[in-house]
Image (cartoon, rainbow, N blue to C red):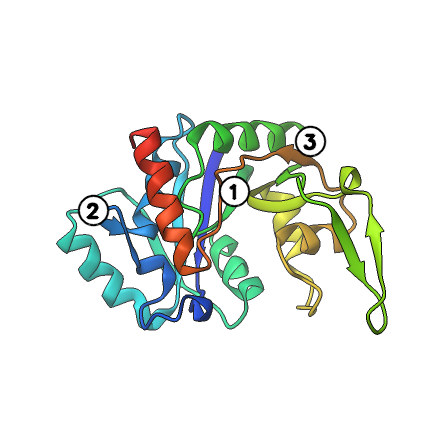
Amino acid sequence: MKYYAIIVAGGKGNRMNQAVAKQFLELDGKPVLMHTLEAFHRCVLNPKIILVLNIHQHQYWEELCVSHGFTIPHQVIKGGTERFDSVKNGIKGLKGKGIVAVHDAVRPLVTSELIQRAYEMAAEKGNAITAIQPVDSVRIKKEGQDSEALNRNELYLIQTPQTFQLEQLKKAYRQPYRNEFTDDASVVERAGFSIYLLAGERNNMKITYPQDLEFASFLLNKKGF
């Protein structure tokens, strides 16, 4: 069985209020993106790593790899206008049978154990979507100031990696883009496949705001990575 990891790094990170895209911000001495690629490199299934990156950032990434002595093997390909387009570009050259994990570049704390479990579940069921349940009470806003409580035991917060059998993912991405495609699971579900949830990790956070970098640094030092 062939294993692939598509790392999607097309975000500009506007909520970080930084001139540098958030995947390139420094986390404990090296860019966030390098931590992410290292997590997949540590996986015992040895996936081929494909980095989908805005074409205007390719040279900058090459320079970062040189300056940090970063030598983990990976293929860099051109990103698209939407995340949908970037993932579609990432799977375009993949053929035959295989398992593909699609992961946000700015989730650097994912563990190799979770990655492996996702590959194994996708091989068995067709896909594996990492998710955690909320710990806070949840409400949905209605018209005006009205709101309604939801049962948090029925809700899941979706993470990445989102992992699929290659044939399933390729079939799903033959569809035209729709605005409601917020992640790969929504694309695959629209193609008629059932979606299977896999227990994620609380520490598998997405770097979105400046304080997230501080918390991620704390967690990295606690783990001793």
Disc 2 and disc 3: Cα gap in Å? 35 Å
Q: Residues within 10 Å of mark 1 (few under 14, many from 20)?
A: many
Which sits earlier in the primary sequence, circle 1 or circle 3? 1
Closest to the observer, 133 or 39: 133
Residue 95 appears in the rendering: no
> 14 or 72, which is in the foreground?
14
> In the image, residue 107 lies at what x, y percent?
45, 47
Which amino acid lies under the numbered mark 1 shown in the image of this protein?
A: Ala
State the residue position of label 3: 125
Q: Nearer the viewer, residue 3 or 119?
A: 119
Quadrant in which residue 49 is drawn: top left
Say whether residue 28 is left or right of residue 78. Answer: left
Q: Position of residue 134 (x, y in %)?
A: 67, 42
The reply to whether residue 91 is visible in this rendering is: yes
Sequence order check: which comes first, mark 2 or mark 3? 2
**Is residue 211 shown above or below 20?**
above
The residue under the point 56% across, 33% down is 118
Badge 3 marks a residue whose secondary structure is helix
Residue mark closest to the camera, 2 vs 3 = 2
Q: In which quarter of the view is residue 163 placed?
A: top right
Q: Quadrant of the C terminus?
A: top left
Of the image marks 1 and 2, the number of the one nearer the N terminus: 2
Q: Which residue is mark 2?
A: 70
Judging depth in this view, the residue of 69 and 147 nearest the camera is 147
Q: Is residue 210 left or right of residue 205?
A: left
Q: CA distance from mark 1 to mark 2?
A: 22 Å
The residue carrying mark 1 is 101
Q: Secondary structure at mark 2?
A: loop
Q: Residue at x 57, y 27 (%)?
A: 120
Query: What amino acid type should be assigned to the residue bearing mark 3?
Result: Lys
Under mark 2, the amino acid is Phe
